[in-house]
Image (tube, helix red, strand yellow):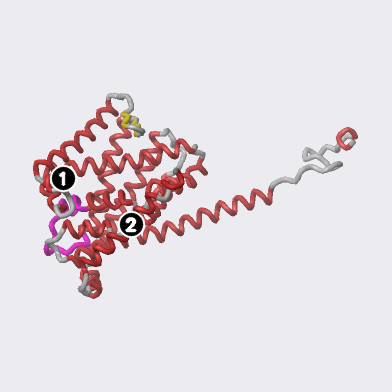
Amino acid sequence: MKRFLEFVWPGLGLLAVVVSVWLLHQQFRGQAIGPEVWADLKAISPHHYLLAFAATLVAYAALAWYDRIALLHLNVKHISWTFIALCSFTTYALAHNIGASVLSGAMVRYRAYSTKGLTTAQIALLVGLCSLTFGLGVLLLGGIVLVADPRQLHRLAPLLPHFLTEPTTARLIGGVCLALVALYAAGSIFNLKPLTIGRLRVEYPRPGIALRQFIAAPMEILGAAGIIYFALPEQGNPGYFVVLGVFMASFSAALVSEAPGGLGVFELLFLKAMPAMAQHKVLTALLVFRLLYLVLPLVFASVVVLAFERRKLEEALNRHETKPEPMREGQVRERGERASPADVG
């Protein structure tokens, strides 16, 4: 049964890709979008490309901070920022593209951090805390967006039940999100007992750790959403606040689907949530996002992994070559003394 369940999520992710790609095909059926998208890519100014690239750096810097925060929670301080940044970058670049982010991220982190002396239990806690940090960011920013502008959920009206898109309900959902964040903060400040929900066990970190989480997670989401915002044309641009809300909904759904790179799922939700803009312009902005946030990091991460594994292989080979041979009968000892008759006899 366990082996069967190992294939369930990858299967659902593949199904999500197939269905989403088919729906996207239906959305653009009969339209020649290739030339329009190419024209839109060339129409984006170098200044906006530079801003989108800067937003990418902000997002990945925050992701590296996720790992640093988790290591501080574990009282691990001997690992350099450079190693943490490369490990985090590689982890998320691969996980975002492969899908099954928790599993793939855990594998990469285990391979890297085990070389620095971390135990399996410590790495598992690190992975869980990084996921929790992202979840806190979604709750915090999502709560703020829904309370400030409850009409945001109405953009997903074709995909959500009607009662969820009502402003009153949306504001209530936002309030619940902020209440959960406040509960987490209170648990940290007052050192409350761990929160247990079924198999889920949340241990509240020190206030300093929680404060860092509340800064790092929104920073990453704001940066990632900024890539799309800067890639959209000024004419018809609904504004950063709207792009942020749509991004969180679409990106979260893509992560839950476990589809590799959220392919199809992310684009479909984004297009449905922004019907007022020309669809090919939205698609162009999403293409820029994929290029900067997914494709280029994947290329760089592949180089980092190959370099890391090559160095580890060379170290293993060197250890094998320099390993001292066992002392043979009658051989002189390393300390320079001759073997005694008792030793050879």
Please name the residue shown 14% across and 55% down the image. Answer: 239
Residue 99 drawn in magenta: no
Disc 1 target residue: 145
The answer to whether residue 203 is above or below residue 151 is: above
Comes first in the chain, label 2 or label 1? 2
Q: Quadrant of residue 285?
A: bottom left
Res 11 seen here: yes
Q: Give the alpha-carbon distance from disc 2 to disc 1, as whole Å.
A: 31 Å
In the picture as drawn, the residue positioned furthest to the front comes out as 1
Q: Is 319 placed above or below 176 here?
A: below
At a point 12% along the width and 45% down the height, the residue shown is 163
Identify the amino acid type marked 1: Val
Task: Residue 20: give x, y in percent of width and height.
Answer: 27, 60
Residue named by callout 2: 15
**Quadrant in which the C terminus is drawn:** top right
On the picture, is 216 further left or further right than 158?
right
Q: Which residues are magenta?
A: 230-246
Q: Residue at x 34, y 30 (%)?
A: 203
Tell me the crowding category of disc 2: few under 14, some 14 to 19, or many 20 or more residues within 10 angstroms, Cα based.
Answer: some
Q: Could you say where residue 154 lies in the image, as x and y percent from the top left?
A: 12, 51
Is 19 above or below relative to 110?
below
Q: SS at mark 1?
A: helix
Amino acid carrying mark 2 in the image = Leu
